Image (cartoon, rainbow, N blue to C red):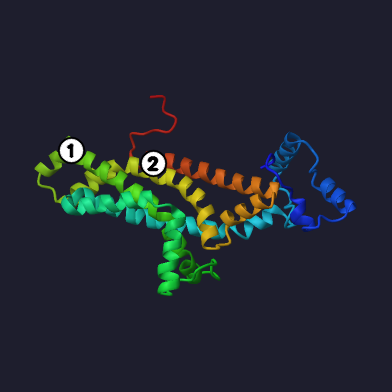
Amino acid sequence: MYLAPGSPLLFVLGPRGGTPEQVAQVTAQYHLDDPFFVRYFAWLADVFRGDLGDSIVYRQSVTDLLGSRISTTVALISLAMIIIVVIGVSLGLIASLRGGWIDQVITTLSTLGLATPTFVIGVALISLFSVGLGWFPTNGSGSGGFDTIVHLTLPAIALAVASSAYLSRITRASILEENGREHVQTAVARGLRPRIVVARHVLRNALIPITTVIGLTVATLIAGAVVIESVFAVDGLGSLLVRAILQRDFALVQAVILVLVVAFVVINAIVDFLYTIIDPRIQLGSKQ
């Protein structure tokens, strides 16, 4: 972004560019003439002190800008994750346990879901459920509570389609693999009920790859939220990042990316910890 043409001065001082004195004042205030590495390491030092800097364009603290929008993105990703886990695991279970034409239909739908771009799904959902049927609003994040859920339903569905399709395929493959294990065949031979066999001997052992995919899905949701929030005009971190990039608001872009990366690292650390709960044989920090 530093190498790309353009300057935040255009958005700060307006299309006319302001007077030479105004340009010099803003340039000195935000150190726009300093070399890239000087500006970056100065920003990094401020981050370690808990200061994310000030937005050049909005002329307010970056922390305040993030605080007013982060809850919307968290709600969107959380709702999408619920849809992904419920739909993806359920379809994978049904496909692996039922087989036949049901398996073929679910596999075909999963392939279509993976092949369709997120923004295309978003536009299709708006055309059908917002413009056509009028069931959901076309934009915004609502006023809180149930209204926010209603506003974020279509964005969450659009964000969850591809990941649900991928999780369903991983679940199906994991269940089919576990079904062929000796301990599962032994449980069936002992006359245990199919539900008990699936819950205790199949699904639990298949949770490791499923949990791994769920953790990695967070990265997809974080990246996809940038597109979806722009399509549905949701005022979250994704749409804020897009505007900040277009306006060359360096401190704001760096802060948003930092928050998203930290969130990704933390969530994957949580997933690693969940491995020890799912399978006690796995130990964190083991040298084996």
Along the line of sight, the residue nearer the viewer: 59 or 131: 131
Q: Report whether 225 appears left or right of 181.
A: right
Q: Residue drawn 41% across and 69% down?
A: 129
For residue 28, above or below residue 86: above
Q: Report whether 54 appears left or right of 195.
A: right
Residue 68: image tag = none
Inspect this view and state whether residue 81 appears. no
Q: Position of residue 164 (x, y in %)?
A: 36, 52
Q: Residue drawn 42% across and 58% down?
A: 121
Identify residue type, mark 2.
Answer: Thr
Quick one: label 2, few (<14), some, or many (20+) residues within 10 Å? Answer: some
Q: Secondary structure at mark 1?
A: loop
For the N terminus, give its image quadrant. top right
Q: Estimate the spatial distance between the alpha carbons at disc 2 and disc 1, rounded to whole Å.
A: 21 Å
Quick one: label 1, few (<14), some, or many (20+) residues within 10 Å? Answer: few
Q: Position of residue 114 (x, y in %)?
A: 37, 49
Q: Report whether 172 appears left or right of 222.
A: left
Residue highlighted by disc 2: 212
* Residue sitting at the far top: 288
Identify residue type, mark 1.
Answer: Gly
Along the line of sight, the residue nearer the viewer: 39 or 182: 39
Inspect this view and state whether residue 65 appears. yes
Residue highlighted by disc 1: 180
Q: Position of residue 247 (x, y in %)?
A: 69, 52
